[in-house]
Image (spheres, coloured by chain):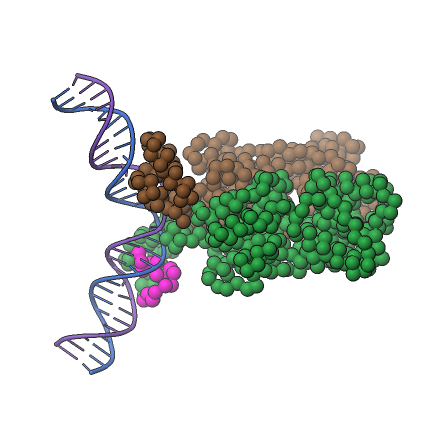
Chain colours: A green, B brown, C purple, D blue
Amino acid sequence: MATMRDVAETAGVSIQTVSNVLNGKAFVRPEIQARVMEAVVRLNYRPNRVAQRMRRGQAQALGFIVSDPNPRGLADPFYGEVLTGLAEMARARDYDVLIEWLPSDQPVRADDILSPFQTRRIDGAVIFLHGENACNPHLLNELIEAHAVFVMLECDSLGDRGYSVCAANFEGGRAVTQHLIARGHRRIAFLDSTQRWPAVDERRRGYESAMRAYGLDAYIMGVSSPDWTHEGGALAVGRMLEASDARPTAIAAATDLLAVGAMQAIRARGLRIPDDIAVTGFDDFDFASFVEPALTTVRLPAHEMGSRAAEMLLGHLSGGEVQPRHVVLPTELVVRRSA
Amino acid sequence: MATMRDVAETAGVSIQTVSNVLNGKAFVRPEIQARVMEAVVRLNYRPNRVAQRMRRGQAQALGFIVSDPNPRGLADPFYGEVLTGLAEMARARDYDVLIEWLPSDQPVRADDILSPFQTRRIDGAVIFLHGENACNPHLLNELIEAHAVFVMLECDSLGDRGYSVCAANFEGGRAVTQHLIARGHRRIAFLDSTQRWPAVDERRRGYESAMRAYGLDAYIMGVSSPDWTHEGGALAVGRMLEASDARPTAIAAATDLLAVGAMQAIRARGLRIPDDIAVTGFDDFDFASFVEPALTTVRLPAHEMGSRAAEMLLGHLSGGEVQPRHVVLPTELVVRRSA
DNA sequence: AACGTTCAATTGAACGTTAAAGCATATTAA
DNA sequence: TTAATATGCTTTAACGTTCAATTGAACGTT
């Protein structure tokens, strides 16, 4: 592989001049510029990014740090979409994207996240933490104190000490509940995990807000173990259907996966959707339009979350003032046939 | 951030001795080792990976290079699963994983793939190319001639000049067809895109092989535009259902997405699955068990494809002989209710 | 003619690490 | 006792690039 030195020798100039031509930092005579560029092409020279990173003291790379106990890992399409948005934006600015998948289901330690910063592999990171790790104040404090540059997804608890990009979970929860109410439902249950997760708490508050606005009683169904899975949703809803005399006419699930579980349990008991019980989800996963009946749900702006987060990181890294520090991107009610 | 120099000064030894202690390259007196380690802990020293990469002349990073015209990008769960397997293996060997998403739907150029190698950002790559890019011999030749270290997914046309990891597409196609035959079907159509794609060609050959073995006629239904989508599948199957007098009793689709499209078209005409027409897919996407009826399909070993590919790359990079060069991982027939 | 300016290129040093050679000191062999 | 060998740490140099300082020429001013 040709180095700058080779180019310099071929063009008959100094190494620094080659650097100047390539980076446009200083004025170089057009004639010499042409000679350098010719050598660059002839030798098929490509700058050694590692040497650049070394000399410039910056990694020119962003990390995508995800912690999720789910064994399917990054296969969750939400991550893929976020990552695509992130990768597109990074690519446009010639930054690399590094994947940091934290497989453990134990509490995330600050070191797990700081490590790629400390070893100078990334300049900044988009961080998504699942469940109870999501807004852990101790963890966040450690990151701030270490001066890590990062954007949290679905957690805006850092005020002016941090950046975040969130979906409008509250509004989404309210919109889907209002939709159910407008369809005439009055007994509407919210299907949730018992494991806390701030993003989902917002969805539930949106639901509660809508219910309150219409003077209706909220009814939270907690799914415990297996958490956040369709099996868990099916189990919880199944139990409810057998026990209950005043069963709800609609179930608003906190995620599409829980909604699918609910649908399975409902159908397994010979009930019809949406006639006997309406079901809504949240996320608008791929399969939402494939299930029968197609799922009414709330779409997350996943792709844009990735690109906006990258934009904020890159803005901060290039020294600009990034405002606002906390972005909430709109969610969208997608009405299909399940409610 | 502390450097090796700081550690050396704190411990009262030379920089090289610190390096020796940390890398275990030369014998250092236990007493001095302890002093160095103490300084490392006290200063919270972390090796600068960029400097290591620079000095050692290797990136300690693997790329995951994907080209897919689909605008949803990496959101396809297949990529997520592969990536998870890749990331786990890389992490275990302390390699980084770099995402290289080639968004274009134009032919992939060798430079797109070579660029991260030439700029020294990766040592090796797992490459997945979609559709007609997949086994483009010119492209592959250029990669080989540039001495790029890579493992192709779903393309084994390189003989002893390259590495590959494939799913047993042929066997999967045969197995699912045999399953349909065993269920009594005789008129079985294969639902495919008209756009060529070697991995899917294998599936079709598996289908044809099974059909031939039972003396049955193959019937290929080509889906053109929109390619590889469920809309495309629905359109093609819809047309077939209206035109045909001798309609098939089963449809073996080349992908789950096409299968879902087929199911929608079938249901839209008031026919029942599997009673009137049985449907099978290929991929075992998340939603395969959520559609109604749950889809009989063939599971791809996506996670293992990622980890095996990483293993081969790492093996090659550490100078070992990697055998075999071409790995075919078993697929698994997953029988659900659609066939 | 002497001087300061500007322009266009060069030179030297540095980023943090590791390979290789170097140099003491201690140990062994003749 | 002396040379050969082993041990344990240090010094030097280098990876490829960019920053900062420097040189030398051309030019205009007084």
**Residue A273 x %, y %:** 83, 48
Q: Nearer the viewer, residue A276 or B37?
A: B37
Q: Which residues are magenta?
A: A15-29
* Quadrant of the frame with the C terminus of chain B: top right
Please say whether residue B22 is one of the residues in the magenta stretch. no
Q: Nearer the viewer, residue A208 or B48?
A: A208
Q: Nearer the viewer, residue B4 or B296?
A: B4
Q: Quadrant of residue B316?
A: top left
Q: Residue at x 77, y 46 (%)?
A: A221
**Residue A297 x %, y %:** 73, 53
Whether residue A199 is visible, yes or no, is: yes
Q: Residue at x 42, y 34 (%)?
A: B319
**Residue A283 x %, y %:** 69, 52
**Residue A117 x %, y %:** 47, 49
- In terms of secondary structure, what is the magenta stretch mainly? helix
Q: Residue at x 76, y 33 (%)?
A: B181
Please say whether residue A26 is one of the residues in the magenta stretch. yes
Q: Residue at x 68, y 44 (%)?
A: A195
Q: Quadrant of residue A68?
A: top right
In the drawing, does residue B243 fall left or right of residue A46? right
In the drawing, does residue B299 fall left or right of residue B293? left
Whether residue B187 is visible, yes or no, is: no
Q: Nearer the viewer, residue B43 or B97?
A: B43
